[in-house]
Amino acid sequence: MENKRVVWLDALKGFAIFLVVLGHCIERVKTGNSTNPILEQTDIFIYGFHMMLFFMISGYIYGLKENKRNTPEPFWHFTKVKLIDYGIPYLIFAVLVWGGKFIFSAFVKFQVSIKDLLLVFVNPVAFTWFLYILLWVSVIVKALDLLVKDRKKVWFITLIMVVVGMIFKTDIKLVDRVLLYTIAYYTGTLISSDFENKVCKNKLVLAVLAVLFIGFSIGRGFVGKQDTTLMAVTGVTGSVLFMVAFSKIGELKNIVYKTLIFFGEITIFIYILHPVFLSAMKVALAKVGITNIPLRLVLLLIVGFVCPIIYYLVSKKIWILDAVFRPRRYMKKRYIVFRERKNLWLTVSELKVWI
């Protein structure tokens, strides 16, 4: 049962990252003020829940781990792990993305300045925001869990956070997005306890979620994808519904499902790298004069997945390419090798306490 749950979660992450890449491809095939209505509505639909889904999956996994513990994981150890897992990759790629935008400013849509680099811990750079906000959300949720010790009360606090975020817009990405996305993360944590009976088999809950998701998604179709008020509803309800759907599917043997599992296993590589390759491909398509929208969309999708996969395969042979994405894994491996060479007394179990 546990392996199946891991498998469907990987497949769900693969589905989520597919939506992310598809959404970014749609954005890049738009030309000037002309908009394909089908692509426009697809884009709005995707943006209604796809990032919320990532947060909910993360919160669900956090909940599963905490459910198995006799005592909660210490706050400082948890924070240290998250700083390594999310903080280090964020800092590396935020600086790299800023540098790329700064150097190639003539080719990018949104210009950056030195001020943007100095505010990298307040207003995350471009698409790297997800790692930074996930770091903050994870740590805040852990603190609330330890202080309140009641998941329903903590969820209510995250609901208040959303309402506060809707009423008071600060235009500070760190503040606004933490207030918005924490509820998705903690909804995942809340439903991780007896997910099958409390959610999957509860027809009334599923019916209410479906009505809210469909209704508010239609509403977003009229107001546009930038509206965060409706997204708070479509994000949470849609994410739960897709979690239920994938948990019910179980483990399939077809190529599509296996591909989604693979995408889910290398999500961070695809998420960080695909915008770079998409931007380069967009410029290349413009240079050669390819204007057919379906063809542009297909070519961008291919590049958005194939290039990160190639990088991932190469990174399995060159450790530094892997280390910038998964530093904690590298730290464990390299330290163990170093310990064996130097015959150090520190044990692997003690190493785990450290990182």
Image (cartoon, rainbow, N blue to C red):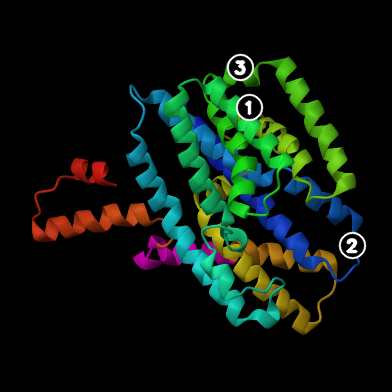
| Mark 1 to mark 3 CA distance (whole Å) | 14 Å
Residue at image position (38%, 52%) is 84
The answer to whether residue 57 shows anywhere in this view is yes
- How many residues crowd around disc 3 within 10 Å: few (fewer than 14), some, or many (20 or more)? few
Q: Is residue 251 above or below residue 223?
A: above
The residue segment tinted magenta is 307-323
Which amino acid type corresponds to the residue marked 3 in the rendered image? Lys
Q: Is residue 233 above or below residue 264?
A: above
- Camera-side mark, 1 or 3: 3
Regarding mark 1 in the picture, which secondary structure is present there? helix
The residue singled out by tag 2 in the image is: 35
Which amino acid type corresponds to the residue marked 2 in the rendered image? Thr
Ranked by sequence position, the earlier of labels 2 and 3 is: 2
Residue at image position (33%, 34%) is 74
* Rendered image quadrant of residue 25: bottom right
The answer to whether residue 255 shows anywhere in this view is no
The residue singled out by tag 3 in the image is: 198
